Image (tube, grey):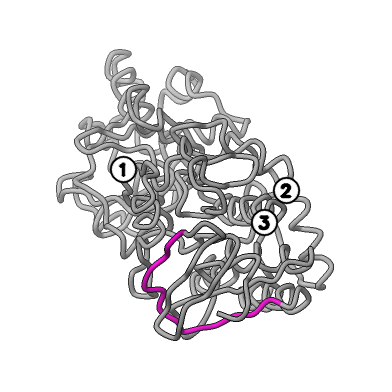
């Protein structure tokens, strides 16, 4: 222990590497420790290998936390436009896919290489694979005990992420350290995760598998710990049930035993050029079959499935009573189904819960009770919506932490 570091960062993922690069370039002596033999695996597999590295429209409204105001300071100090400038400075080509989601044109490895280059500019020392065995506090700072020796440091930054994708080494180590030092922890659970459904969710799913439909989906309640949500996203019908971005978004707000609500026409109506009331009351449709009318706004297979549920297959619209039309409209615009559960940590993209923000300073990400102990990224009780927001939290929380080291 001949050297005292300004900061030892435990975790070499998105938040840890970014924080290290910023701090190093501010003149801090920084050491990054990680137990993995290859750094940035979660970045590498994200976005289908192209890394949805931020969202142009990322704002506090895109995050879940028991304290929804907590994210405001960090996001204001390091908004998505700043990370986009960094990506531009490295000549990394990217494209917008949907609602501000930015992906690399080529490979997620470009983002990993950029973070490593930023660390090199800041003369950051990176050691991996290294096992951190204990962290202790002393009067003059902190000791980080590893399987290769003990490091002395003025500050410790916990950036080990969350529990999703255990196959690439995900752990709850940051939460363990928080508990060790008496910080409150919000019980973690999988988020942005596919939901499982029983066999009778939607008749014969084999006939509908592969269909993708834009829907308006609602999940959660005011009494839910993160409230309720409503999203316009694509829903995918599979052999096992419902999936796609709509279901992933809804999963973050879903509570055990609660239904999710799907308006199969809402997203189309919002996009314009279609009015739900007109569809069900237009007398010009009198001689058309019910399934034909529905297929004007839904895939034919799905239109037939809904018509069958109300025994309307083969019936002309003029033969369908106003009451039956109203019941069909209600079925389509307020379809309700109870998920059986989630597919768990193996399939989750992120973690809900984590280190309770009550124990942290939102300006710096430092513990309110232990000077020099910081928590950044996914291990904090801040979870973004689908679409690059979770990476933006990694950059923003890492940035404000680096400024405070």
Q: Position of residue 239 (x, y in %)?
A: 26, 60
Q: Earlier in the sequence, mark 2 or mark 3?
A: 2
| Image quarter of the N terminus | bottom right
Q: Which residue is mark 2?
A: 78
Q: What is the crowding at mark 2: few (fewer than 14 residues within 10 Å), some, or many (at least 20)?
A: some
Q: Earlier in the sequence, mark 1 or mark 2?
A: 2
Q: Count of labels shown?
A: 3
Q: Is residue 167 visible?
A: yes
Name the residue furthest front.
139
Left or right of residue 151, residue 168 in this image: left
Mark pair 1, 3: CA separation:
61 Å
Q: Is residue 58 magenta?
A: no
Q: Position of residue 45 (x, y in %)?
A: 50, 72
Q: Is residue 236 visible?
A: no
Left or right of residue 360, residue 58 in this image: right
* Image quadrant where residue 26 sits: bottom right
In this rendering, which labeled residue sits more in front, label 1 or label 3? 3
Q: Secondary structure at mark 1?
A: helix
Q: Secondary structure at mark 2?
A: loop
| Image quarter of the C terminus | bottom right
Q: Which residue is mark 3?
A: 405
* Image quadrant where residue 228 sits: top left
Q: Which residue is mark 1?
A: 304
Mark pair 2, 3: CA separation:
16 Å
């Amino acid at each position: 222990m001949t050297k005292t570091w300004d900061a030892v960062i435990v975790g070499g993922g998105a938040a840890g590497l970014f924080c290290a690069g910023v701090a190093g370039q501010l003149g801090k002596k920084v050491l990054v420790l990680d137990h993995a033999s290859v750094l940035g695996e979660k970045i590498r597999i994200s976005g289908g290998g192209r890394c949805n590295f931020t969202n142009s429209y990322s704002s506090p409204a895109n995050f879940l936390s028991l304290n929804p105001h907590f994210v405001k300071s960090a996001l204001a100090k390091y908004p998505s436009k700043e990370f986009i400038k960094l990506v531009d400075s490295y000549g990394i080509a990217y494209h917008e896919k949907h609602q501000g989601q930015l992906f690399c044109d080529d490979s997620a490895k470009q983002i990993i290489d950029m973070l490593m280059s930023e660390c090199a500019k800041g003369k950051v020392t990176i050691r991996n694979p290294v096992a951190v065995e204990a962290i202790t506090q002393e009067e003059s700072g902190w000791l980080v005990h590893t399987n290769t020796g003990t490091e002395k440091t003025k500050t410790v930054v916990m950036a080990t992420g969350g529990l999703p994708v255990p196959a690439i080494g995900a752990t709850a180590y940051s939460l363990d350290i928080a508990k060790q030092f008496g910080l409150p922890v919000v019980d973690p659970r999988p988020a942005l995760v596919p939901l499982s459904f029983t066999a009778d969710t939607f008749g014969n799913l084999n006939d509908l598998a592969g269909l993708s439909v834009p829907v308006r989906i609602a999940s959660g309640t005011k009494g839910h710990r993160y409230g309720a949500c409503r999203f316009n996203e694509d829903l995918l019908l599979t052999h096992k049930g419902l999936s796609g971005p709509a279901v992933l978004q809804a999963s973050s707000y879903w509570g055990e035993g609660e239904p999710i609500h799907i308006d199969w026409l809402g997203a189309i109506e919002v996009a314009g050029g279609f009015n739900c009331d007109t569809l069900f009351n237009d007398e010009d449709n009198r001689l058309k079959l019910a399934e034909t009318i529905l297929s004007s706004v839904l895939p034919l297979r799905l239109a037939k499935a809904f018509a069958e549920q109300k025994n309307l297959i083969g019936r002309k619209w003029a033969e369908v009573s106003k009451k039956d039309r109203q019941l069909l409209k209600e079925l389509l615009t307020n379809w309700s189904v109870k998920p059986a559960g989630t597919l768990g940590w193996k399939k989750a993209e992120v973690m809900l819960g984590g280190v309770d923000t009550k124990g942290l300073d939102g300006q710096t990400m430092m513990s309110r009770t232990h000077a020099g102990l910081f928590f950044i990224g996914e291990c904090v009780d801040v979870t973004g919506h689908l679409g690059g927001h979770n990476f933006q939290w990694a950059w923003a929380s890492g940035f404000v932490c680096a400024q405070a080291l």
